[in-house]
């Protein structure tokens, strides 16, 4: 276990170091591909190092009609490999396995918080809830790593109202800190019959308006909490971003009439999330690098939108 | 000048009937009527005041002061007698009726003129000998009258006549009056000193009691004097230098000051002062009111500056250093640099749901995609077990192994090598084709020399087992079939000579062959003859065929 961790860490560092060179190479290949696609007679002369076969073909090529042949040759060798940054690297192999989530709270949770965490357990498929008791965060994370959990979610509260959500990817993965606002839990709606039971099928996801790089990163973090669904499930979970406030909604839909008629029924809790920090380590690694942190006291922060439009 | 008493009454009536504004402007007729009226009154009262030195009021060539003096001399003893008589009447009311009848006529005209103030003053004089009170009241009345004059210029005639009676009434406060006179003189001197104007002759301008009215009267009277020029000049001076104080009595403020300086701080002066102040406040102009307001504001601000500041103006204020709940009352305004949290309204929920519906209809979800991962290791070479019987014998297998061990280069290629070879050949072909396609000039296929036998069979038969079409094309080309050489001619083409030549050639060939046959036969025959030896059959030397 220790040795595996050490090896993984070394691999990660090596890939991080390679990142620069690979990216340069990839950029070169991409430029040539584009030039060919545009069928321009002049190829960028800055590409001094070209693959051998390409050189031979290009040197003899004079007409535009032969361009497509070279293109075919190239795609064979470029293999469409996008070099990955070490930042998003954590989710490279995440799709191989279904996510396994651990849910817990801060210490001494109040009854409404416990109810909320129970609801969240049904929202995320393949999630487990444990009592916090008096455990230390680092212990929890270590045991999670040993048991092959992929994510930990911590929920914090203020006088019964849930106000914080921390999503930490394991192992070594990024940690996203959210603040919760306008929380409406299923328990608030007293009528049990009207609400019914929550379906536990793997849901479809809708992530709307995550446009910037940071938005893409957040979308990635949220996406990989859910497994791959069947194409015909009726359960939808929505993360809609509006001016840096992400709305979480949970619906079930039905198609009564033709294909255009959709009836949505809202189930599950609803809340607004506000991202305030992303760290490049797990929760217990306090010295981890901060990828992004909110700056509310900067004068221009009112005008800027960090996650989407 | 001296007119009978009837015209005097007329004059009085005339005076009473004049409009008050008319009295303001100096007119000689009015002054004349005033003089005659006063003369008349004087003469009326003369019988009751035996001690007076004048038989009648002398008005020709006398100025207002002199006329006043005369009236004064007459009226003062008269007042004392009147007082005595009234006291007597009080004690003995039965006599009053007798007296009333007599006096009715006399007092008729005068009583109308008498104002309430006069009677009041009389009573006061009667009841109270306090100089201060009298003075105050006197001054009050004067000031009130004058105030009244300032505000409205009605009742001028009344005032004027009242004033005249006042002069008479002044006999009751003789001492004060004299003092007033002194005061007036002093004031004149003082003002002349301060303002540089010769005002000794002019009493009325700066005095409490006698202002416009007096001026008017003086002017009226002075116009008829011999000193007209002088007075005119003065009058003109007064006109040119007409001041605020002439009309609104601003000097009252300064007057009490001077009075206080003049006297020994007696009550009278203080009373005057107060009166002056009171009189001042009542008559402030808007400008002065503004100035006062400003002054008070300035005072307030200065006071506020000296005190310690309010907690909102201080720097860092903790909860302990400000009053309780004070932060709630103050409108604290600061810029928020974060957008406020969104309030979830119906519209926002509806818009989110619309978006969701749209996505569902399109089927555009953001689920995770399973990325097919590249194999991290090359696929193992699966060794296929060939189940056919091995074509090579066991000895050959061992032989190959031995060769491999000793000389790996010469070893025959293995199955996988064959496949590789095949692959490389295929690839070369492909490369060739592609190169050919990409070249400008055509390069033909390289010829691979290959030996094989071709039978001259119909071509189709070679390709198809069941020929659907019969063709007469043969596999071999005619030149391949033809085995001869040289120039071939048909029979029709051959010439005579050629024919002869051919026949000759044929004959020669035949002969040669025949000889060969003969010799072969002879050989065989000799062999046979040798066997037989008796045959006289000898072969002729070609007897038959020569």
Image (spheres, helix red, strand yellow):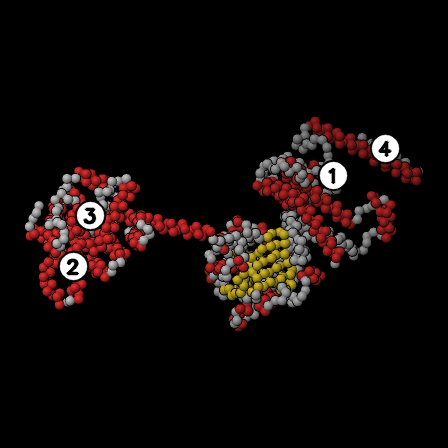
Density class for disc 4 (Cα within 10 Å; few <14, some 14-19, many ≥20) is: few
Which label sits in the foreground, 2 or 1?
2
Q: Is residue A228 visible?
A: no
- Which residue is under mark 3? B214
Nearer mark to the viewer, of 3 and 1: 3
Q: Nearer the viewer, residue A126 or B524?
A: A126
Q: Chain of mark 3?
A: B
Asked if disc 4 and disc 1 are in contact, CB closer than 8 Å, the reply is no
* Extreme-front residue of the structure: B51
- Which badge, 4 or 1, is on the more N-terminal residue? 1
Q: Earlier in the sequence, mark 4 or mark 2?
A: 2
Q: Earlier in the sequence, mark 3 or mark 4?
A: 3
Q: Quadrant of the N terminus of chain B?
A: top left
**Disc nearest the viewer among 3 and 2:** 2
Indicate the secondary structure of the residue bearing disc 1. loop
Closest to the observer, B281 or A47: B281
Give the mark nearest the N terminus, 2 or 1: 2
Give x and y (percent) for residue B505. Answer: 75, 30
Q: Chain of mark 4?
A: B
- Residue B422, x across and y down, in percent: 73, 46
């Amino acid at each position: 276990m220790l040795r595996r961790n050490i090896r993984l860490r070394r691999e990660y560092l090596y890939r991080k170091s390679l990142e620069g060179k690979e990216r340069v190479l990839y950029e070169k290949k991409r430029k040539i591909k584009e030039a060919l696609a545009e069928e321009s007679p002049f190829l960028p002369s800055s590409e001094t190092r070209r693959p051998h076969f390409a050189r031979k073909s290009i040197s003899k090529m004079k007409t535009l009609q032969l361009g497509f042949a070279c293109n075919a040759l190239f795609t064979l060798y470029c293999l469409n490999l996008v070099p990955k940054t070490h930042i998003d690297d954590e989710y490279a192999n995440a799709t191989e396995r279904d996510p396994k989530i651990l849910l817990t709270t801060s210490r001494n949770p109040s009854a409404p918080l416990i109810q909320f965490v129970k609801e969240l357990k049904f929202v995320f498929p393949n999630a487990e809830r444990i009592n916090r008791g008096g455990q230390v965060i680092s212990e929890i994370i270590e045991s999670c790593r040993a048991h092959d959990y992929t994510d930990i979610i911590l929920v914090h509260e203020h006088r019964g109202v849930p106000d914080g959500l921390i999503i930490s990817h394991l192992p070594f993965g990024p940690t996203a800190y959210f603040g919760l606002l306008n929380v409406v839990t299923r328990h608030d709606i007293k009528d049990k019959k009207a609400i019914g039971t929550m379906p536990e099928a793997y849901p479809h996801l809708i992530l709307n308006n995550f446009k910037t790089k940071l938005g893409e990163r957040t979308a990635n973090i949220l996406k990989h909490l859910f497994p791959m669904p069947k194409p015909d499930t009726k359960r939808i979970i929505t993360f809609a971003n509006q001016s840096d406030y992400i709305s979480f909604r949970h619906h079930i839909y039905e198609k009564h009439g033709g294909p255009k008629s959709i009836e949505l029924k809202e189930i599950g809790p609803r809340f607004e999330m506000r991202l305030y920090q992303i760290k490049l380590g797990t929760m217990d690694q306090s010295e981890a690098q901060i990828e992004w942190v909110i700056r509310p006291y900067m004068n221009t922060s009112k005008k800027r939108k960090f996650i989407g439009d | 000048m001296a007119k009978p008493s009837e015209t005097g009454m007329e004059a009085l009536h005339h005076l009473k009937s004049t409009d008050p504004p008319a009295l303001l402007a100096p007119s000689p007729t009015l002054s004349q009527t005033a003089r005659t009226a006063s003369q008349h009154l004087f003469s009326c009262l003369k019988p009751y005041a035996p001690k007076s030195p004048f038989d009648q009021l002398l008005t020709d060539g006398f100025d207002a002061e002199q006329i006043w003096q005369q009236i004064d001399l007459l009226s003062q003893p008269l007042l004392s007698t009147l007082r005595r008589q009234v006291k007597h009447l009080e004690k003995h009311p039965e006599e009053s009726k007798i007296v009333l009848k007599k006096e009715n006529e006399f007092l008729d005209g005068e009583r109308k003129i008498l104002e309430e103030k006069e009677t009041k003053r009389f009573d006061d004089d009667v009841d109270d000998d306090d100089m201060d009170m009298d003075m105050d009241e006197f001054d009050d009345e004067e000031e009130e009258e004058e105030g009244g004059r300032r505000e409205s210029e009605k009742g001028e005639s009344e005032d004027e006549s009242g004033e005249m009676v006042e002069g008479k009434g002044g006999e009751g406060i003789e001492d004060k009056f004299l003092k007033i006179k002194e005061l007036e003189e002093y004031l004149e001197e003082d003002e002349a000193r301060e303002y540089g104007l010769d005002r000794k002759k002019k009493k009325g301008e700066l005095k409490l009691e006698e202002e416009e009215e007096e001026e008017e009267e003086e002017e009226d009277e002075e116009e008829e004097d011999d000193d007209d020029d002088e007075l005119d000049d003065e009058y003109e001076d007064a006109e040119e230098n007409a001041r605020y104080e002439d009309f609104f009595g601003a000097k009252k403020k300064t007057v009490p000051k001077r009075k206080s300086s003049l006297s020994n701080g007696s009550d009278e002066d203080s009373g005057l002062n107060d009166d002056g102040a009171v009189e001042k406040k009542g008559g402030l102009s808007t400008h002065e009111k503004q100035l006062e307001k400003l002054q008070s504001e300035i005072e307030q601000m200065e006071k506020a500056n000296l005190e310690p500041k309010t907690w909102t103006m201080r720097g860092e204020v903790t909860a302990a250093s400000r009053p309780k709940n004070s932060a709630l009352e103050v409108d604290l305004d600061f810029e928020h640099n974060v957008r406020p949290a969104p309030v979830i309204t119906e519209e926002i929920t509806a818009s989110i749901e619309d978006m969701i519906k749209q996505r569902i209809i399109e089927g555009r979800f953001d689920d995770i995609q399973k990325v097919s991962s590249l194999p991290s290791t090359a696929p193992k070479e699966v060794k296929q077990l060939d189940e056919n019987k091995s074509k090579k014998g066991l000895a050959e297998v061992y032989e190959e192994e031995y060769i491999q061990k000793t000389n790996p280069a010469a070893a025959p290629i293995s199955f996988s090598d064959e496949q590789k070879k095949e692959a490389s050949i295929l690839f070369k072909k492909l490369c060739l084709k592609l190169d050919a396609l990409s070249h400008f000039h055509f390069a033909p296929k390289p010829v691979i020399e290959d030996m094989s036998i071709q039978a001259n069979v119909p071509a189709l038969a070679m390709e198809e087992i069941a020929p659907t079409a019969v063709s007469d094309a043969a596999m071999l080309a005619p030149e391949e079939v033809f085995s001869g050489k040289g120039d071939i001619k048909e029979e029709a083409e051959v010439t005579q000579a050629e024919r002869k030549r051919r026949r000759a050639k044929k004959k020669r060939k035949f002969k040669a062959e025949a000889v060969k046959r003969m010799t072969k036969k002879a050989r065989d025959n000799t062999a046979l003859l040798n066997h037989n030896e008796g045959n006289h059959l000898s072969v002729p030397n070609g007897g038959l065929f020569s």
